[in-house]
C-alpha cells in the first residue's frame, strides 16, 4: 500500500518525503531509499499515474544536443567564435557551421560576428568533457539584430512557453512582439511593446508555481494593454 505525502503541484524542498510504499515509482528529480521516495530539488510535484516527478523551480541549465539557445560572442579564433552560453561552459561556432558563404582563411571574422553579438544557435555536439559545438545552419538560427535580451531562470522556460506554446503565443499576440526563447533562459524580444513583454515574462518567472497562471496572465495583459 502506497501512502502519498504530497499533492499535485505542491512545492517541495530537497530531501522532503513524497511517498511511502512500493506502488509509487520515482520519476525525474526524485530518489528512493528503502520504501520511501524523496525529492532531490526545490520544485513542484507532478503526479502521473503511479509516477511522482518534481519540476525544478531553480537550478542551472545543462547543455544538450539539439537545444536552441541564445548566446553571446566572447572571443574570436582563427576558425570561428567562442560564446558565453550562460552556464559554466562556453561553446564554439566553427565558420563552416555559421554560414553557407565561402569565407577566405584570412578573412576578418569580426565582420560576420563581433564580440558581444548575440545569436540564436542550435547545440550540435556536447562531449563528455562538456565541449560544446554550435550551428547556425537551420531556418530561424541567426545573428540577433535589435530588440532586447531578457534573462530568466532556465528552469522557468517551460512555464514561459506554456503547454503547446500557449503562454508565449499569448504574450506575442497581446504585445505584438516577436519572441524567441532559448533553453538556457535567454529570451529575445523584438517589437512595438517590448516593455510589456518583458514585464509579462518576468511576472511568469516570479509566479511560475501558481496554478491557473495562463488565465491570470491573460487578464494581466488585457489590463495592461487597455490602460
Image (spheres, rainbow, N blue to C red):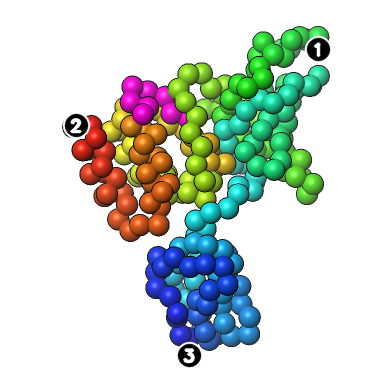
Indicate the quadrant where residue 45 lies. Answer: bottom left
Counting from the top left corner in percent of width and height, residue 209 is at: 40, 57
Which sits earlier in the primary sequence, circle 3 or circle 1?
Answer: 3
Tell me the residue that label 1 is attached to.
Answer: 105
| 225 is within the stretch colored magenta | no
Check disc 3 and report its element: helix, strand or loop: loop
Mark 2 element type: loop
> Where residue 220 appears, x then y in whole percent?
25, 42
Q: What residue does disc 2 label? A: 227
Q: Earlier in the sequence, mark 3 or mark 2?
A: 3
Residue 1's label in the rendered image is 3
- Between circles 3 and 2, the one closer to the viewer is 2
Q: Mark 2 or mark 1, which is nearer the start of the sequence? A: 1
Quadrant (top left, top right, bottom left, bottom right) of the C terminus:
top left
| Observer able to see residue 93 | no
Query: Residue 162, position in %: x, y?
Result: 39, 48
Q: Would you say 191 lies left or right of 219 here?
A: right
When the figure is inspected, residue 93 is found, relative to residue 66, above or below; the finding is above
CB within 8 Å, label 1 to label 2: no
Please provide percent x and percent y for residue 4: 45, 80
- Compared with 56, 135 (above or below) is above
Q: Residues in magenta?
A: 188-195
Q: Is residue 136 left or right of residue 227?
A: right
- C-alpha separation, residue under disc 3 versus residue under disc 1: 68 Å
How packed is label 3: few (under 14 Cα within 10 Å), some, or many (20 or more)? few
Amino acid at each position: 500500500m502506497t501512502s502519498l505525502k504530497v499533492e499535485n503541484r505542491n512545492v517541495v524542498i530537497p530531501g522532503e518525503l513524497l511517498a511511502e510504499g512500493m506502488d509509487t515509482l520515482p520519476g525525474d528529480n526524485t530518489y528512493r531509499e528503502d520504501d520511501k521516495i524523496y525529492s532531490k530539488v526545490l520544485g513542484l510535484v507532478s503526479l502521473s499515474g503511479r509516477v511522482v516527478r518534481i519540476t525544478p523551480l531553480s537550478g542551472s541549465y545543462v547543455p544538450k544536443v539539439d537545444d536552441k539557445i541564445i548566446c553571446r560572442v566572447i572571443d574570436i579564433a582563427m576558425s570561428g567564435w567562442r560564446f558565453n552560453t550562460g552556464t559554466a561552459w562556453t561553446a564554439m561556432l566553427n565558420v563552416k557551421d555559421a554560414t553557407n558563404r565561402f569565407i577566405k582563411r584570412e578573412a576578418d571574422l569580426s565582420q560576420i560576428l563581433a564580440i558581444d553579438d548575440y545569436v540564436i544557435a542550435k547545440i550540435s555536439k556536447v562531449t563528455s568533457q562538456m565541449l560544446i559545438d554550435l550551428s547556425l545552419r537551420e531556418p530561424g538560427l541567426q545573428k540577433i539584430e535589435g530588440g532586447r535580451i531578457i534573462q530568466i531562470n532556465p528552469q522557468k522556460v517551460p512555464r514561459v512557453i506554456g503547454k503547446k506554446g500557449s503562454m508565449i503565443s499569448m504574450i506575442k499576440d497581446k504585445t505584438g512582439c516577436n519572441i524567441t526563447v532559448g533553453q538556457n533562459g535567454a529570451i529575445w524580444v523584438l517589437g512595438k511593446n517590448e516593455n510589456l513583454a518583458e514585464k509579462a515574462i518576468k511576472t511568469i518567472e516570479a509566479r511560475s508555481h501558481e496554478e491557473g497562471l495562463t488565465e491570470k496572465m491573460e487578464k494581466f495583459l488585457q489590463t495592461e494593454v487597455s490602460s
